[in-house]
Image: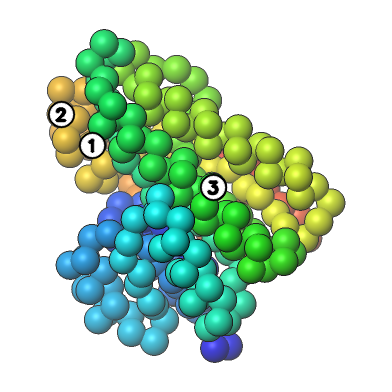
């Protein structure tokens, strides 16, 4: 395979889907990890020679290990984008264990995919892009567990930066505000459709991320905070 490989977790919908499309337009080969079989099937049929989907649970260590091994045998992994995650927006006293399990899967997947990819790449020539949220930068009334997850992801990201400072591994943290996607579909008591319509367009956010991480200069943008004008 002559094309450089980009791995994107959670690339069947929303921001992840826009990242898949725009990277393919830039002539990358995209390996997409998601659990939505029907949407992944559509993507595979649409993009064929520039795309491969892997359906599974990002918090399943064996699935992650096998997936990274298979991808690495196909070509050079240039970029890993940890994007997958789910929200739970509730008042602090309303959270149940299943809400915690759902939110923390994103952090588990970020760690597992980063670890296995760094091993395969022998810790060199790799960009690790961790897409989090503005919730990683502040606390929010109905986002206690979600913020806890995102603050954990931020801590992991900052620790990776320190661990690989001065090497050819570049670690980039991305902190977008609200994006107009299906992300909020089960949270209408917190984010109404009217409010969501004022959020950023996924196309614009994806373009901003890609423009910053694929620039031709010998520079790395370490943190990308994306907010509405």
Residue at x-position 80% and y-position 47%? 165
Q: Which residue is mark 1?
A: 184
Residue at x-position 46% and y-position 56%? 61
| Closer to us: 214 or 84 | 84
Indicate the secondary structure of the residue bearing disc 1. Answer: helix
Looking at the rendered image, the disc whose residue lies closer to the viewer, 3 or 1, is: 3
Looking at the rendered image, the disc whose residue lies closer to the viewer, 3 or 2, is: 3
First in residue order: circle 3 vs circle 2: 3
Residue at x-position 61% and y-position 41%? 157
Q: Which residue is mark 3?
A: 111
| 93 horizontally vs 21: left or right | left
| Cα separation between marks 3 and 2 | 30 Å
Indicate the secondary structure of the residue bearing disc 2. Answer: loop
| Residue 64, image x, y percentages | 46, 61
Q: Which residue is mark 2?
A: 188
Q: Residues within 10 Å of mark 3 (few under 14, many from 20)?
A: many
Can you say whether 89 is above or below 207 in the image?
Answer: above
| Residue 53, image x, y percentages | 35, 72
Residue 24 in view in this figure:
yes
| Residue 47, quarter of picture | bottom left
| Cα separation between marks 2 and 1 | 7 Å
Q: Are marks 2 and 1 in contact (CB under 8 Å)?
A: yes
Q: How is the image coloured?
A: rainbow
What is the quadrant of the N terminus in the image?
bottom right
């Amino acid at each position: 395979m002559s094309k450089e490989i980009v791995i994107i977790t959670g690339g069947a919908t929303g921001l992840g889907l826009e990242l898949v499309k725009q990277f393919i337009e830039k002539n990358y080969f995209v390996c997409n990890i998601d659990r939505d079989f029907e949407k992944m099937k559509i993507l595979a049929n649409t993009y064929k020679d520039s795309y491969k989907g892997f359906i599974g649970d990002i918090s399943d260590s064996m699935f992650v290990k096998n997936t990274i091994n298979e991808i690495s045998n196909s070509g050079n992994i240039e970029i890993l984008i940890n994007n997958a995650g789910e929200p739970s927006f509730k008042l602090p006293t309303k959270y149940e264990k299943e809400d915690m399990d759902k939110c923390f899967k994103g952090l588990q997947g970020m760690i597992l995919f980063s670890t296995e990819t760094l091993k395969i790449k022998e810790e060199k020539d790799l960009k690790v892009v961790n897409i989090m949220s503005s919730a990683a930068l502040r606390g929010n009334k109905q986002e206690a567990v979600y913020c806890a997850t995102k603050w954990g992801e931020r801590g992991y990201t900052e620790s990776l930066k320190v661990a690989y400072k001065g090497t050819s591994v570049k670690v980039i943290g991305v902190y977008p505000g609200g994006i107009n996607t299906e992300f909020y579909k089960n949270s209408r008591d917190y984010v109404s459709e009217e409010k969501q319509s004022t959020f950023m367009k996924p196309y614009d956010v994806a373009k901003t991320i890609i423009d910053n991480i694929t620039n031709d200069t010998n520079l790395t943008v370490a943190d990308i905070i994306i907010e509405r004008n």
